[in-house]
Image (cartoon, helix red, strand yellow):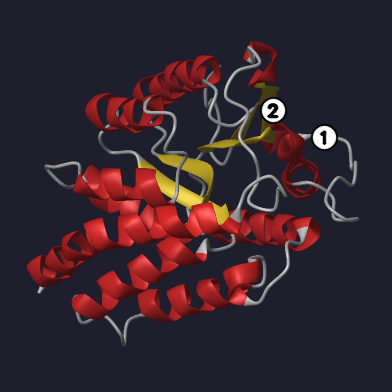
Amino acid sequence: MGAKHRGQIYLYGEQHCNQKIMEKQLEIWHDFYHNDNLRCLFLEHCYFATEFFNMWMRSSGDDILEMLYEIALAPNFPYIKDFFRTIKKNCPETIFCGTTPAYPPIGEKYLQYLEDSNQIDSDKYCQAKKSMEKGKRLYAEYGGEWDDGYREANIVENFICKFEKLNGESVMGIYGAMHIMLDPVEYFDDVPCLGHQLKERYGEAVHFEDLSYLFDGKNIILSPQDENIQEKDITHSLDKANKKYGKVLKRLGENRN
């Protein structure tokens, strides 16, 4: 392993939120960070979440991480927080880049932060509003409907946009295993997956490894569209988090002014 040339893309597939796989991801990122000077870590998270992660990386406490854990991550698996804390401790200059369409509950928090910090006229606010509109198309509680093809197309578009702004930097990306397949297998409603489209565009600069072989059958995460997830349970969880972390975001905005 090693970023021998500039402009390389190293993609790693996973079964989401599996501890063994996450431990291996930490090893790989540590190696890239310290031996090859990589700094940008692309994640299957939305822009808002990774903006908050990057704010947390520069902060002294864990308020932001705790908020993300309850609203945007999987709050039944505490080692997810350890994953990010390990990166903060051992690879402190890491920059997280999110590429999925917006998850509206965390998007609302990010917009609140920008408003509280008087950034309504900023490019960030404009981008955030556009991301919110795209994200709402996927969630029923916002009048949308889950669409795998739309989501995958947005992941690809966002990845390419962010990568091409890095002026030749190499990056690592962590995505669900189906997103990084080389074959143009259309799991996503006739939209070729991220890995295939990146390979078509960047050729030999794209490298793949599926870490799903480490999957031990534990901690299977359901997608938001899974019929077994009760919307009222999600809403109740978000309401609790909103009450708990509203003051945290307000303080962040005030501190920036």
Q: Residue at x 61, y 52 (%)?
A: 230
Q: Where does the image place residue 183, in percent across and percent down from the top left?
A: 88, 36
Q: Residues within 10 Å of mark 1 (few under 14, many from 20)?
A: some
Q: Residues within 10 Å of mark 2 (few under 14, many from 20)?
A: some
Q: CA distance from mark 1 to mark 2?
A: 8 Å
Residue reaching furthest to the bottom: 121
Q: Residue at x 18, y 59 (%)?
A: 248
Query: Of 89 and 45, which appears nearest the observer?
Result: 45
Query: Of 123 and 36, which appears nearest the observer?
Result: 123
Q: Which mark is residue 112?
A: none
Q: Which mark is residue 182?
A: 1
Marks 1 & 2, CB-CB < 8 Å contact: yes
> Which residue in the structure is indicated by mark 2?
208
Amino acid at the residue labelled 1 = Leu
> In the figure, residue 251 lies in which quadrant?
bottom left
Q: Where does the image place residue 22, in percent across and percent down from the top left?
A: 49, 22
Q: Where does the image place residue 97, in percent across and percent down from the top left?
A: 46, 50
